[in-house]
């Protein structure tokens, strides 16, 4: 969005925790960005992903093609590859960037948020204490680094 204030308000009401259809969320963000570019609403799209990078809901489930099973949820390798494949789409897209704000506790870190940013050719920031002020500050700095105000 062009409006940092609007994004902030939406972030404040966003639920956290639970299932993470991360690949689906990135796909939807890409489609939304493409539509905004086609309509002339925006020139550059920056996906700001606030996550530990761990997906636990397969794309087929979040798109309603399959039911969520314990087996599918436990296949971490397949979930990881699916997520990274979706993120790699951004590398070849003109005027698209990704910023990943890593909220994972480093004590139990998997490093997935960093891998996600690298796959997308984006930027990575670790935020040890992810509060409103730190998230907003890092997101704002990241947007500036892409030439956005």
Image (cartoon, rainbow, N blue to C red):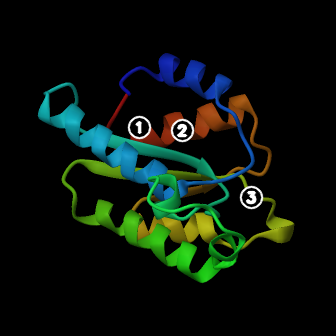
Q: Give percent across and percent down for residue 11.
A: 61, 28
Query: In the picture, residue 148 is in which quadrant?
Result: top left
Q: Real-space Cα distance between discs 2 and 3?
A: 16 Å
Q: Taking the image as drawn, is residue 43 in sight? A: no
Residue at image mark 1:
144
Q: Is residue 48 visible?
A: yes
In depth, the one of 55 and 139 nearer the eye is: 55
**SS state under label 3:** loop
Give whichever of discs 2 and 3 has the lower sequence position. 3
- Whole-percent x, y for residue 8 in the image: 57, 23
The label shown at residue 139 is 2
Compare marks 1 and 2 and give the one earlier in the sequence.
2
Residue 73 picture quarter: bottom right
Q: Is residue 49 above or below residue 33?
A: below
Which badge, 3 or 1, is on the more N-terminal residue? 3
Q: Mark 3 or 1, which is nearer the eye? A: 3
Q: Report whether 76 appears left or right of 62.
A: right
Q: What residue lies at 86% left-to-right and 68% top-to-bottom?
A: 107
The spot of residue 51 in percent (x, y) is: 63, 52
**Residue labelled with disc 3:** 104
Task: Looking at this view, name the residue that lies furthest to the bottom.
Answer: 77
Q: Position of residue 6 (x, y in %)?
A: 49, 18
- Disc tally is 3
Q: Residues within 10 Å of mark 3 (few under 14, many from 20)?
A: many
- Which residue is at 31% across, 38% downward? 32
> Tag on residue 21?
none
């Amino acid at each position: 969005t062009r409006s940092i204030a609007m994004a902030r308000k939406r972030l404040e009401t966003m639920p956290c925790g639970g299932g993470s259809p991360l690949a689906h969320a990135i796909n939807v963000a890409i489609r939304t960005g493409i539509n905004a570019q086609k309509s002339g609403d925006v020139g550059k799209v920056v996906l700001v992903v606030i996550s530990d990078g761990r997906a636990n809901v397969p794309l087929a489930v979040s798109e309603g093609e399959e039911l969520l099973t314990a087996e599918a949820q436990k296949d971490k390798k397949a979930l990881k590859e699916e997520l990274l494949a979706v993120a790699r789409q951004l590398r070849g897209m003109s005027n698209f960037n990704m910023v990943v704000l890593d909220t994972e506790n480093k004590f139990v870190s998997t490093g997935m948020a960093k891998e996600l940013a690298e796959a997308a050719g984006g930027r990575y920031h670790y935020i040890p204490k992810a509060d409103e002020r730190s998230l907003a500050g890092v997101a704002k700095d990241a947007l500036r680094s892409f030439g956005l105000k």
